Image (spheres, rainbow, N blue to C red):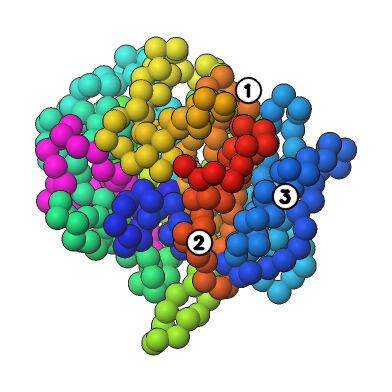
Amino acid sequence: MGPTDKRPRAYRRAAVTALTAALLAGSATPAVAGEKDRPELRKVIQTFVDAGFLGVQVRVNDERGQWVGSAGQRKLGTSAKPPANGHFWVGSVTKTFHATVALQLVAEGKIGLDAPVAGYLPKLGLDRQITVRMLLQHTSGLFNYTGDLDPDGTWVPGLPATGKEWLDNRFRSYRPEELVRFALSRPARFAPGKGWSYSNTNYTLARLLIEKVTGRSFDAELKRRILGPLGMKGTMVPGNRTRLPLPYAHGYFRYQDAGQWKVADVSRQNLSLVAGAGDMLSTTKDLHTFFSALNGGRLLPAKLLAEMRDPHPKSDPLYGNYGLGLFVQNLGPACGTVLNHNGNPPGGYAALMYSTPDGSKTLTASLTAGDAAFDFAKYPKLLNDLVKTVFCGSQTGSAQ
């Protein structure tokens, strides 16, 4: 998830920003005919709707096969459930795709993991101590262009990425170089390699790096290396496209205007604001296909997959600790380790992507926000219960 809110912890803030929804009832039901009923999954996804999300679509692949379900509403004012095969903005799940392509280029000898980024992108004036690894692990110290914290904890605004200011600018087009230069105009958080701070700037630079080294757009490289070989037809880098392909569930953004709360449908938005860091769209099926293949060893050599899973000890522990483009989370002795990266664009949507280390069990999901305030304190427990229901069987109810 791209950190865009003004909460004190960047990644915790990103986990819940803009996820406000109506308190809408309705039962969760399997969405694909012929699949075995999974009452424990129906029950846990319904808790998200009961807590205030407008809609949820979930896909679980495990030893019992595949289960797909949805709960809530597809659109305010209608009774239809979210489409189980719907498209959605995936937010910072985008980072895992970029890290994978970058590491493929490392495997091919076209990028050095510990080489200075400035050697590949000399015109940006980057600190030569910043390496490719530092971009992928968020240890560069570069200011996050959607807003960041000073070392003393003071919030420093960035480009319009939250509130009514973002809403009014949500169709604006940005160039990746513009985002990076804005970030470089602000003081660094810390010296390269001397700390950890989640920053969208790192992954916008990763996109520029990939494009410079390959001589092709990231979209073209993604299709050639991942989407085509894996048959992923519901995933794309939209550029300035603002519409989700059909079918999709609507997402909403609750904001204050002249002292009054209002709600806007933000199903359409231009995500060039977070190019490389959060601008892709996908489906639960495609995210399962990708993350299962990645963790099953089909996209990277074993040595680089191990590098990807080597977490930085100072990274924010809400979802585990950060490796190279993914989080490594220990669910406890009875459940083991899961790998994940979640995400949300500035408003309306959130995406979940989890897998066991061998790729044999995955959880992928999309959440949509509605028209009433959401209790942010509830989200970590809701997520914890869902993850433990999938990866630990019946062990739920104990937030980490």
Give the percent coordinates (x, y) of residue 14.
40, 53
Per the image, the residue denoted by label 1 is 360
Q: How many marks?
A: 3
Q: Amino acid at mark 1?
A: Ser
Seen in the picture, residue 107 relative to 370 is either above or below; the reply is above
Seen in the picture, residue 243 relative to 288 is either above or below; the reply is below
Give the percent coordinates (x, y) of residue 172.
38, 64
- Magenta includes 22? no
Query: Which portion, as a residue range, is magenta?
Result: 172-201
Write the residue at 21% across / 28% down. Answer: 131
> Which of pointers 3 and 1 lies earlier in the amino acid sequence?
3
- Which of these two is toward me, 226 or 257? 257
Residue 108 at least partly seen:
yes
Per the image, the residue denoted by label 2 is 19
Per the image, the residue denoted by label 3 is 43
Residue 389, quarter of picture:
top right
**Is 191 placed left or right of 366 in the picture?**
left
Helix, strand or loop status at disc 1: loop
Query: What label sits on residue 115 in the rendered view?
Result: none
Helix, strand or loop status at disc 2: loop
